[in-house]
Amino acid sequence: MQSILSTPRFDRMLAFYAGVFGAVETMRFPEEGDVFYVGLRIGDSELGLVNEPDAGHEASARYALSIEVDDVDALLGPVEALGGKLLGAPNDMPWGQRVAHVHDPDGNLVNLTR
């Protein structure tokens, strides 16, 4: 399974996922000219970004990406520096995970987990 996000702010979203999570581009279509789609690898997962300049700016509250990271706290600065928003302090969950909830630049919910 792969998650795909459509965004009217393609360059900003690409910079966010590359800068915060170290996402590596695995595919670009078309290879030259105005980009429509970029496939990204984050760890052992895939994320697609679709460049849709006419798409709305509102994110769905029913969708969240959960990304396993090495250090939740260390990523909070890059999240905000790259246009994301911290939704509260990180929490230690009873089941052993450390979790922070953030929004990416388009307002999509992203859970940082360790």
Image: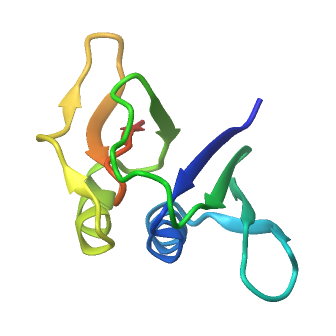
Residue at the extreme top: 94
Res. 18 image quadrant: bottom right
Quadrant where the C terminus lies?
A: top left
Question: For the point 33% across and 27% down, which residue is it?
Answer: 61
Residue at the extreme bottom: 33
Q: Is residue 92 above or below residue 29?
A: above
Question: For the point 31% across and 69% down, which residue is it?
Answer: 78
Q: Give left or right: position of 81 versus 46.
A: left
Residue at the extreme front: 54
Question: For the point 54% across and 69% down, which residue is it?
Answer: 14
In the rendered image, residue 32, in percent from the top left (x then y), is placed at 85, 87
Q: Give left or right: position of 91 versus 52.
A: left
Quadrant where the N terminus lies?
A: top right
Residue at the extreme right: 31
Res. 31 image quadrant: bottom right
In the rendered image, residue 72, in percent from the top left (x then y), is placed at 33, 47
In the rendered image, residue 33, in percent from the top left (x then y), is placed at 79, 88
In the rendered image, residue 24, in percent from the top left (x then y), is placed at 70, 68
Residue nearest the viewer, comparing 49 with 68: 49
Number of marks present in the image shown: 0
Q: Give left or right: position of 54 versus 93.
A: right
